[in-house]
Amino acid sequence: MFIDQAEIFVSSGKGGNGIVHFRREKYVPRGGPDGGDGGKGGDVIFCVTSHINTLANFRHKRRYVADDGKRGGRNNRYGKSGEDLIINVPAGTLIYDEDIDELLGDLTEEGQELVICEGGRGGRGNTHFKNSRHQTPRTAEKGAPPIEKNIRMELKLIADIGLVGVPNAGKSTLLTSLTNARPKIGAYPFTTLIPNLGVAKFGEFESVVLADIPGLIEGASEGVGLGHEFLRHVQRTRILIHLLDGMSEDPIADFSQINTELSLFDPQLGEKPQIIAYNKMDQPAVAERWEEIKAEMEERGYEIMAISAMARTDIHELLMKAVEKLSQMPTLEEEAPMPLYSAETDPNEFEITRINDGDWQVSGESIERAAKMTYWEHSGSIRRFQKIMQALKIDVALREKGIIEGDTVFIGEYELEWSE
């Protein structure tokens, strides 16, 4: 089972106690202090491994405690240090301190380690407390207490190419055709409920990783449906293959809606390079619409190609086009860190201002971006924009302000007439 969120309790080991002891040997009546120090407690360390790709291991075990250090011994013997606790996680795991909601680390590379809780220092034995005035100290230290934290983990899949599109657009079929992945496939929406990864090989020694992201629906950026559960996986990808469902009633409106949801969740997602593919060309009805769809997309400045994931028509050409685009992109290490979704910096906030009698100005990062990405000449796109306003509760706020039928609403550079 694919699990991409988990919460656990971790604790480092307690330091071992130092001891009070004096040298006791025959013919040495005044042996000095020789109490040894306690050992250091074990650290809690998160380590990236390629052997796992989900956080499912943390569903049933949620408490992780490192070993305590051992007490010191006589003759200045140090106590044994506690074993470090290594917690293996998949690449792409974000580690948060749940209690203060602070990001502690972003683990992306094989073998990368992050010390979350350092083990307690071992207590000092009475040897350390001897001085010229106090030759027989009966003083020692207990080991330092452990560090405890409640940890939240979030997994963002790391892939070169992300496959996005509406439910049932054919993303899983394309992933199967290009790679050895075997996702669940069916002729109904939301077959894919979890992200799937596959490796596509080209050339003799080269390959790229593709991620099939579950289908986006209206309101996904608001958490509707799978919402944030899968949108964050798109953030790690370097480019996107945007698959249009040729059997859809309005593929171009679908394209607009997907990009709107991506941008509402994270503005940088809307700026990721996309390769647009019109799918299901093996269907006669789809093939008939191809020239019309192509002309309209090119008129709007987009390059588009036609494929059939099921018949495997032109999918190699699609892959090579994506590979060429990848070669022009910076790697994840070269890019600036991807922003994290946070309620404290919610892009969905908005402000409503009364300009004059019958005119209203709605300002907000998300709604203005959605307006810019809406095809106003398509009635379906307008309906989707209305649903975005409802999801953001802008319509409710306008009614509370006193808007009436026929009033004008300005959103960015767009002028709309209010109608119930």
Image: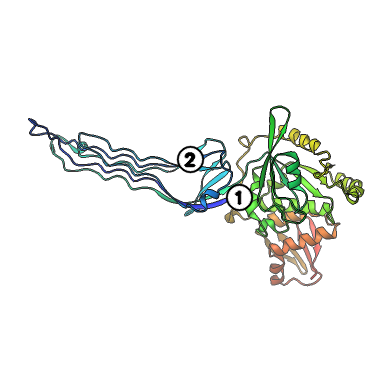
- Look at the picture and state if 368 lies above or below 155: below
Helix, strand or loop at mark 2 = strand
- Look at the picture and state if 304 lies above or below 261: above
Q: Position of residue 89 (x, y in %)?
A: 53, 43
Mark 1 crowdedness (10 Å alpha carbons): few <14, some 14-19, many ≥20? few
Q: Residue at x 70, y 59 (%)?
A: 219
**Residue wearing tag 2:** 114
Q: Which quarter of the figure has residue 77?
A: top left
* N-term mark: 2 or 1: 1
Helix, strand or loop at mark 1 = loop
Q: Which quarter of the figure has residue 22?
A: top left
The three-letter code of the residue at mark 1 reads Phe
Of residues 292 and 199, the one drawn nearer to the viewer in this rendering: 199
- Look at the picture and state if 171 lies above or below 134: below
Front tag of 2 and 1: 1
What whole-number distance in Å separates the C-alpha atoms at marks 2 and 1? Answer: 23 Å
Q: Position of residue 244 (x, y in %)?
A: 80, 49
Q: Position of residue 235 (x, y in %)?
A: 65, 45
Q: Position of residue 352 (x, y in %)?
A: 69, 63
**Residue wearing tag 1:** 2
Q: Residue furthest toward the top?
A: 204
